[in-house]
Every structure is written in C-alpha cells, then in structure tokens.
C-alpha cells in the first residue's frame, strides 16, 4: 500500500486552514468526486437501456409471434427458447478474452451490439423456423460477445471502492429498458393487433441508437495500458526502477511489451472459490418463467396478465440495483451475492404456498427483483475486483458463463422435477436446497473483502 499517492492528512496540506483543524475544501471536493458514478458508466447504461428496449420488445412477443403469426407449434417455440437461453453462454469467455488481448473492450463490445442490431433487420423478412432460429442465435451471440467487454469498461471507469454502486447504476438503466421494452410491445399490439412489423421497426431503431451512443459517446478506454501507466508513474515518482514489461517514450507515452494475458487467474484461490460458489448457486436457480407459471397455476389469473409478472420483477430490480450495489461496496460483495439467494428461496416459498391472492404473488415478484439486484451486477463487480486488469474481461465472462450454463442445467432439472412431482413440490425442493447451500457458500466467500482492490496492488507493485 505504500506505493499509493495519498492526499495529505487533514490539517497538514497546503490548503488546510490556519488552525490546522479542518480538512481543505479541495480534499472534500475530491472525495465527493470519487464517490460519483462516472459519466462513462452512465453512458454505457444508456446504451444498455436502448439495447434492452430493442431486445426485450422482441422477446416479449416472440412466443405469440412464432405460434400465432407464423402458425408454428409450441415445440417449435421450445426450440427457439432453448436457443435464447444457451446460444450466448459460451461466447462470453471469447468476448472477454478478445477484449483483454486487444486492450480494446469498447470495440469488441461494439461488434456484439452491432451483430444484435443486424438481426433486427432480418426479423423484418424472416418467415420460417430456420430463419427465426438463426436470427435468435445471432442475437444471443452478440449479447454474449458484448457483455464481458462492457463490464470491463465499467470496472475501468469506476472508482475501485465504488464498483458495486457503479454496476448497480448500470444495471438499473439496463433493467429500465428491459421493463419498457415489453410494455412498448404490448402497447403496440393493443393498438394494432397485427403490429408485428411495427414492433420490429421500433426495435431496430432502438438498437441503432444504442450502437450509435456506444461508438460516438463512450471513450475508448484501454484498461491494461492505463493500469501499467499508473504503475510506472507511481514508481517513477518514488524514485524506483522502471516496472517490468513497459518502456516510456519522451512524451510520457507507454509501449506495452510481452504477452501480459494469462489464464493463471483460474489458479487463484479467491477466484476459483468465487467460480465454485457461482456454479453451486447457479445449479439451484431455475428460470423465472417456472415461478410465473406456478403463480398462474395457483392463482388462475387471465393469460393476458402474464407479461406483467416480468414487468413487476424488472421494476423492483431497476429501483434497487444502485442502492444494493452501494450496500455491497460497504458490507462485502461476496456476502450480498450469496445471501441474495436466500431471498430467491423465499420467492420459491411464496410461489409454493397454498394461499392464492395478490399478496403472495407480489411478494414473489419483489423477492425475485431484490435477488437480481443483489446478484447480477454484484457478481461482475466482485469478479473484476479479484483479478488483475489484464484478465478482467475474461474473468467476468468466465463467471457469467459458469452462471449461465449452470442455470440452464437447473432449469432442465427443475422441469423434470415439475413433471415428476408437480410444481409445488418442485419449488419446495429447490427452496430447501438453497437453504442448505447458502450458508456453505457464505463460508467459501467470507474473505472476499481482503482482496477487493487489486488495482491498488498493481499501483503499489
């Protein structure tokens, strides 16, 4: 820690008051600036907002479009839905790897956003299962490519001690788009019963705006170069020898040498524990659709109200993502990540209780929203804080892939339980398994706060 450039203690700096008892106004302003969410994070949130308006407007009507407008069977939609769930999972690691190796996460993310935008054009002309399935796969691949580089940009722009808050603000804007998209789509269908083309045109417009905002407004941050430059300058200020792997030209620029990327982060104890925890908890996290189907089966409400269940969960997530992220920065991101799954177990219980009515239904939706606020952005923030800058995007992509793949397995297994025992019994089994797993996982991540600021370690090296 001695390598950090610290502000002068209160009362000793050149801007301190004559009495030496008050902190300077300049230091107070610096602390306030450090606590703010950077404009880059907000801009990335706007990009995600527009993109989610585009994607969720389509995904919300896809079941109706495939079965009603195109006249395909439910089995055909099942194929499409399976592709939605799994197509982008494995390419997340590839997207993160490309961002780390090139040190250009913005442009790798732009490829993913651009690919998804192109699929909106295809939807205007697609008419059969092969075409629809291909477009869905391409869209999900685009999502997989962009996710880890985008999160690496957030981590690079944010203050290391406010990672949870920054990711929370981004996820709030992201989820606002996921909430508005379905509402917009169903508003169009309410006004135009066969307005599929109108929805696809609106979706295309939102996607193009999102790509434009990314390319034109988000700075081309180079996380690895910035970290190495900070390290060198700090060592130079302290009169130490130059850091290994870089040379500085006369203008103060930096030339990177060697191949700094390495998969060795997978041998680190804290990172491996986090991936194990993410895998265990992912295996016990079933798709939200099962919970909503159980609620509908119990309460018997009309089918046209079904999409509003997604809106209820997303609205809760949107409102709580930023404050929960800030809480995670204070009390420990690992704790918040793990204990969020206790609320998921409570949501399963609410859906399994034999008490139909609005109270238990709303409680289940709220608990699901709080669960996502405590886990989605927090996982990315925690992962980025456990690994060096050179492998940050790859590590985030790896953690997200572990979560996505294990949740796919969980949903398939839960479907078997539902078929064998019924929805209520299956939900009780999932809730009971989470009650056992949460304390075990909390033990595994109990020391995450000890290494939550590797950027500090890099600067001090």
Image (cartoon, grey):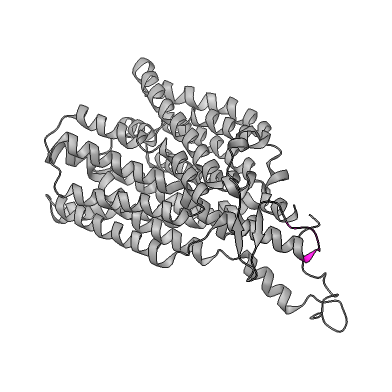
Q: Is residue 165 visible?
A: no
The residue at 17%/53% (across/down) is 190
The x and y percentages for residue 187 are: 22, 55
In the image, taking residue 396 as reference, residue 176 lies left or right, namely: left
Name the foreground residue: 355 vs 420: 420
User: What residue is shown at x 86% (from left), y 76% (from top)?
Assistant: 21
* Residue 250 occupies quadrant: bottom right
Q: Which corner quadrant of the image does residue 261 belong to?
A: top right
Q: Please provide percent x and percent y for residue 345.
A: 51, 32
For the point 71% across and 77% down, the residue is 26
Q: Determine the main secondary structure of the stretch shown in magenta.
A: loop
From what the image shows, is residue 176 above or below residue 219? above
Count of numbered labels shown in the rendering: 0
Residue at the extreme top of the image, as rendered: 420
Is residue 240 inside the magenta stretch? yes
| Snapshot quadrant of residue 410 | top left
Does 117 appear above or below 8? Answer: above
- Image check: 149 left or right of 196? right
Front residue (pair 44, 321): 44
- Residue at the extreme right: 19
Chain part drawn in magenta: 237-242
Q: In the rendered structure, does residue 148 fall within the stretch colored magenta?
A: no
Residue 27 in view in this figure = yes
Expressed as whole percent of the image width and height from the top left, the position of residue 127 reads 12, 41
Q: Position of residue 274 (x, y in %)?
A: 60, 35
Residue lying at 39% horizontally and 63% vertically, measured from the top left:
215
Q: Which quadrant is home to the N terminus?
A: bottom right
């Amino acid at each position: 820690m001695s390598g950090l450039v610290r502000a002068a203690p209160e009362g000793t700096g050149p801007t301190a008051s004559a009495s030496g008892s008050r902190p300077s106004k300049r230091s107070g302003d610096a602390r306030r600036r450090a606590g703010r969410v950077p404009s880059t994070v907000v801009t990335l949130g706007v990009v995600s907002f527009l993109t989610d308006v585009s994607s969720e407007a389509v995904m919300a009507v896809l079941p109706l479009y495939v079965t009603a407008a195109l006249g395909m069977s439910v089995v055909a939609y099942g194929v499409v839905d399976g592709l939605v769930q799994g197509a982008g999972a494995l390419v997340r690691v590839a997207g993160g790897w490309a961002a780390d190796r090139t040190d250009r996460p913005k442009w790798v993310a732009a490829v993913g956003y651009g690919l998804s935008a192109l699929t909106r054009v295809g939807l205007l002309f697609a008419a059969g299962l092969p075409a629809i399935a291909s477009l869905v796969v391409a869209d999900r691949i685009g999502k997989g490519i962009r996710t880890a580089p985008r999160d690496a940009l957030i981590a690079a722009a944010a203050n290391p001690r406010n990672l949870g808050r920054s990711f929370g603000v981004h996820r709030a804007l992201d989820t606002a788009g996921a909430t508005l998209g379905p509402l917009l789509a169903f508003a169009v269908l309410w006004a135009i019963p066969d307005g599929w083309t109108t929805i696809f045109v609106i979706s295309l417009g939102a996607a193009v705006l999102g790509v434009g905002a990314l390319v034109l407004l988000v700075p081309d941050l180079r996380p690895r170069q910035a970290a190495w430059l900070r390290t060198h300058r700090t060592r130079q200020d302290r009169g130490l020898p130059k850091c290994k792997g870089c040379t500085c030209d006369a203008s103060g620029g930096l030339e990177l040498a060697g191949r700094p990327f390495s998969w060795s982060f997978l041998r680190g104890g804290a990172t491996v524990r986090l991936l194990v925890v993410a895998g265990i908890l992912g295996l016990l996290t079933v798709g939200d659709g099962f919970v909503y189907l159980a609620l509908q089966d119990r309460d018997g409400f009309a089918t046209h109200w079904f999409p509003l269940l997604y809106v209820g969960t997303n609205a809760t997530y949107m409102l709580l993502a930023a404050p929960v992220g800030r809480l995670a920065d204070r009390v420990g991101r690992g704790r918040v990540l793990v204990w969020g799954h206790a609320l998921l177990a409570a949501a399963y219980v609410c859906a399994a209780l034999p008490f139909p009515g609005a109270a238990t239904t709303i409680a289940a939706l709220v608990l699901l929203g709080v669960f996502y606020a405590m886990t989605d952005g927090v996982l990315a923030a925690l992962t980025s804080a456990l690994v060096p800058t050179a492998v940050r995007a790859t590590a985030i992509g790896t953690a997200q892939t572990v979560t996505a793949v294990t949740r796919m397995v969980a949903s398939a297994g839960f479907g078997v339980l539902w078929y064998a025992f019924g929805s209520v019994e299956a939900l009780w089994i999932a809730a009971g398994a989470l009650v056992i797993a949460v304390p075990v996982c909390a033990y595994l991540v109990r020391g995450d706060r000890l290494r939550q600021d590797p950027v500090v370690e890099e600067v001090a090296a």
